[in-house]
Amino acid sequence: MRHVLRAVLLALLLAAPAAAAPVEFTFNAPVDVVWEKTLAVLRVLGWDVDKDRVDRSIGFIVTDSRRVDGDNFGVYEKSLRHRLQINVRRASDTRTTVSIERSVFKRERIVFVDKDEPIEDPRTEVQKSLLDAIGKSL
């Protein structure tokens, strides 16, 4: 029985898509300043923010997904896309930690029905460049 339970647990762990660890940095600035600069940098870099998934009270921002590769013909799309989840949290009165998690997925759309399939992508260049841009704007 114990071996069956271990096999089932292992199968569940292997079947679940692995999320890459978030990339984070602590800035020497108050949380309100970092929050505003983060939103401004996202706008400048062309990231649209999902208006339903932004909550200043908990420091949570989710961007709309962006196409990395592939084709989009309106009613038909087959592409690789990514979106960012950003957490801005107070570390102290004068320090703020920003963590960014990037999710990558394949999207196939046929007649306005989207089918998204998460994939693992260990690269962190997007997150690091966004953190660098936030740091430069402070």
Image (cartoon, rainbow, N blue to C red):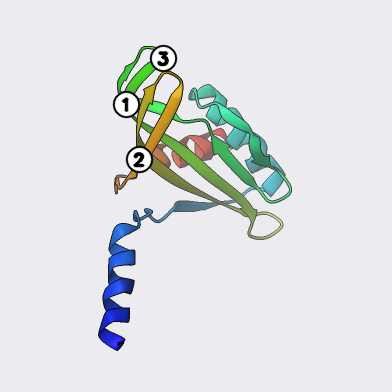
Mark 3 → mark 1, Cα distance in angstroms: 13 Å
Residue 127 is labelled as none
Residue 14 falls left or right of residue 59: left
Q: Amino acid at mark 2?
A: Glu
Q: Which residue is mark 2?
A: 117
In this rendering, the answer to whether 64 lies above or below 6 is above
Disc 2 and disc 1 in contact, CB within 8 angstroms: no
Q: What residue is shown with label 1? A: 79
Q: Residue at x 33, y 73 (%)?
A: 9
Front label number (2 vs 1): 2
The first of marks 2 and 1 along the sequence is 1
Residue 18, picture quadrant = bottom left
Quadrant where the C terminus lies? top right
Q: At 49% from the left edge and 52% from the top edge, which residue is drawn?
A: 25
Q: Where does label 3 land, which residue?
A: 75
On screen, residue 16 versus residue 37, left or right, reads left
Which structural element holds mark 1? strand
Foreground: 118 or 92?
118
Q: CA distance from mark 2 to mark 3?
A: 18 Å
At numbered mark 2, what does the secondary structure look like: helix, strand or loop? Answer: strand
Residue 86 placement (x, y as % from top left): 54, 45
For the residues bearing labels 3 and 1, Cβ distance under 8 angstroms: no
Q: Amino acid at mark 3?
A: Val
Report how many numbered discs are placed on residues in the image.
3
